[in-house]
Amino acid sequence: MTAILELRGVGKRFGAFSALRDVAFDVGERETVGLIGPNGAGKTTLFNVITGFLRPDEGSIRLAGQSIDGMAPAQRVARGLARTFQTAMVFPGLTARENIAMAVRQHAGDGLRWFGGARAASAAAEIAVRLLGDAGLAHRAETPLRDMSHGERRIVDALMSLALSPRLLLLDEPTAGLTRAESDRLLGILRRNHADTALLLVAHDIDIVFGHCDRVVVMELGRVIGSGTPAEVREDAEVRRAYLGSTGG
Amino acid sequence: MKRNIAMVALPAAAAAAAALLADDFVLRFLAEILLFGIAVMSLDILIGFGGLMSLGHAALFGGAAYAAAIAARQWGGDVALVLGSGIATGMVLAALMGVVVLRSGHLFLLILTLLMGQMVWEVAFHWREVTGGADGLRGLPALSLGPWTLSTARALFLLAALLAAVAFVVGRSFVAAPIGRALVGTREEPIRMAALGYSLFAVRFRALVLAGALAGAAGALFPFVNLYVGPQSVHWTQSAAMVIMLVIGGIGSLWGAFIGSAVYLGIQTYLSAYTDRWQLCVGLVFVLTVLLLPNGIASGLRILRDRLRRRGA
Amino acid sequence: MPNATDHEGRASSASARAAASAAATRRLLLVGATAGALAPLATPALAQARPLRIGMVTSLSGPFAALGESMRAGMRLLLAQSGERFADRPVELIVEDDQARPDDGVRKARKLIGQDRVDLLCGVIHSGVALALRDVVTEAQMPTFLLGSANDLARKAVSPYILRPTKTNWMLGSTAARRSHETHPGARVVTAASDYAAGREFVGDFVQTYQEFGGRIGRQFWTPLGSADFGPLLTAIAAERPDSVYVFFAGSDAVRFLRQWKEYRLAGRIRLTGTGACFDQEDVLPAVGDAALGAVNTFHQSPTAPASAAFVEAYRTSGKGLPGEFSTTGYACGQVLRAATERTGGDPTDWARTRQALFDAPVDTAFGRMPFDPRNGQAILDIHVHEVRSAPGGVINTVVHTYPQLRDPGPNA
């Protein structure tokens, strides 16, 4: 299996504080990789570096074999890299359909279109409704996001990123605040309907991570302290120490 | 459908009635309201839709006025030439402004647009050979369209009304198109937009250049209202007046810009006969609007209309 | 010109529509006002009973506020002396403030013309405002007595609707140069002036005339309007060691300059000459006292010229002290308006007749005998050379020489 994402020696400092140190791992095509670690481990910082919102101090990042160092976020998106954020960054005043259509238009190259805008807008709307339908939310297409439940909002948030047909999707705590059932539903949508997209997801619920991920990478204090299949990681001594230590006994 | 017909027929009828019945003073005054209305509407696209707070908009409007006046004095008052030079100047100035200003945060945007606007003022005030300096430019030829001379107040008013209608349609089209929605997106969730692959700079730059074109078209006809253009029209206080007009009229409504322009200019023209403190009155209206109708008079009218509809239903 | 019947016909059909719609009521008022305003013009007999409405645009706030107040005071004095009537016709004066800004001046002029429907327009101090108004009043065909003094107003910006009962800047700059050449031939002169249109014209005309006489001009200094500190300028002037200095500063700048001229001990050491406006009897000299003693200036207005004696006396009696340029200008403008009304049997809005009446014979004003040049409607004026001398209670511009009946070169200049 070829790697869709390759991190080598990635480091990031904020003044004297090292947020990331010598981070290196791969994500394979169509793989689902879980990224776990205690608070402050540097997971969100790593996401920001991978997606171009932060510039690393050292190391290299390759997407589908091509270096993406120094590229702006929009350029990385164009190459097939998408992400969500810890809070669902949706447009509260727009409907679910319009939210997703915003992403669809950009992916179709119509994001800045003026002439022929009506046709592009309706084409995008159709695709958006189809994505919602596949996720079981077609009946909510015309609902403004601010009127939706937290779980539905997270699904729409994920669908927005998936509308970009990314080869790799970074999900920063996509199941935070969701019930078990809602989490399973969200991840089920991701795995079933978008099986071609590799996923790198951060989650704190160990059961979710171990239940849905092909591999798990463990971080602590900015470094990778272990990686492997869920079973391997569960037995790893370093990992057990980190988690036992962080939960304070 | 009926609503659309009413939206077109009512303003058209009002314009025709004014053209037939109003005297020269009122016609020029209405033309001035319409031209400022167009400029303020283009500012609405930046502030209301894009969240880009600009205090340099008068530089686009007034700069185009100067360009049109200079071109007319040089090559005659053909409407195509006048509008063309105004639109081109508005777009170029907007592009320059955009390149400097759009990569910075919101507070810097406010200050930088103010500074860049004042740079235009400095040019207008000091480049005496071209702009007339502090004295401004006069001696403009009459506007003409092919064989017809458009020198009367009525002709100017009708031209301004036509331009306002076209500008409004263009503005609405832009705002409804993907680019317009992207602009709103960059205002609401700029980080998300970047994460969706949008270039924030590209979206905002296009909006700014469009606003420059619209303000430039309006500015091109402005010298022909007073048969004069001076540095006051590019001063930052004029930019501030436009923001006040926008707030009073209604941010985000596009057509509210014309209401705000009418209220401001109406107070300035008619109240200044009775008192020097007309600006105090404008300030009062501004404060009342912000307190009672934060989305401007346009929102108030909309609420009124909805209430009437409900009562009728 | 549409006749009254046309408008009344349109008015009655409009009134039928107005009954049906409240929105049209306002338009009805507009039409009615138009009809009402135009009707008198078609029937001259009615005109004389109707008050003569005169609109005055002047600066009542901003940098020229004091000058504008003086202009208004002068006009008001003339009206009071005339019993508020010209040729037995009551006169209404409406004054609007242009804030010394051309945009506001144009707006106010349009309002006076279109809304207040004045019969005649007058006023303006700031030349920029005057130039801006030129097209507006011409397009509106409004008879205007324009008082700004930029040279273009008598040359490139001439209009058949504008008469100018005041000076042009050239009259002052060129006579100062002539006088300097006549009294001190061969002197080396440096100039210092406020950097705006009027300053550039005064100095430009002085330099051109002086050089035509073969005189030598040293450095030319410029300061922005509203300067507070003239120290660097005065030091630089002293360093030049000129034979004399020709200056023009506007309003409060003149007061500050002259005070500092004395503080820097240049008074009495370098011959000081300048434009009369910089040594205005009402607005400058009272504030600078003996700092200006001995200075020579050229001006069309003088507190000591025989022609203005009656006006000076009346102005002093009204409690205001010695008059300066703008009070005299306001008064003289009123005198011209009165003469225009009297010579046309009470109807100065018959503009062709008014112009002819004023071109045929001069008007006696506080500036002296004032004929008008038919080429450009520009007044032909006596220009006095003043020396600032001591007088009981202060200093006074004393006439030492007069260039009589000076005519601006005009449109062919």
Image (tube, rainbow, N blue to C red):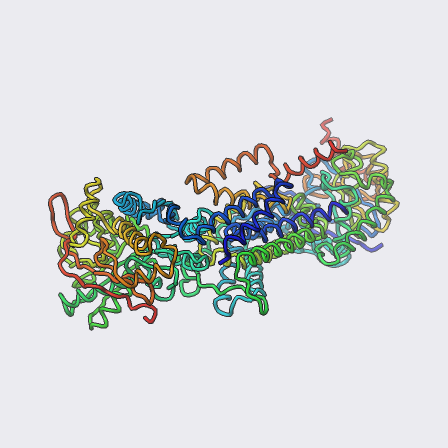
Where's residue B294, x and y in %? 60, 36
The residue most toward the top is: A249
Q: Looking at the figure, which quarter contains the N terminus of chain A?
A: bottom right
Where's residue C400, x and y in %? 13, 58
Apparent side of residue B298 relative to residue A190 in the rendered image (left or right): left
Q: Quadrant of residue B189?
A: top right
Q: Nearer the viewer, residue B302 or C106?
A: C106
Where's residue B255, x and y in %? 63, 46
Where's residue C130, x and y in %? 37, 56
- Regarding residue A15, the answer to whether it shows in the image is no
Apparent side of residue C394 relative to residue B213 in the rendered image (left or right): left
Q: Nearer the viewer, residue A17 or C280?
A: C280
Q: Nearer the viewer, residue C161 or A90?
A: C161
- Regarding residue C233, the answer to whether it shows in the image is yes
* Whether residue C123 is situated above or below residue C157 in the rendered picture: above
Q: Looking at the figure, which quarter contains the C terminus of chain A?
A: top right
Total labels drawn: 0
Q: Quadrant of residue A85?
A: top right
The residue most toward the front is: C45
Apparent side of residue A228 relative to residue C196 in the rendered image (left or right): right
Q: Quadrant of residue A159?
A: top right
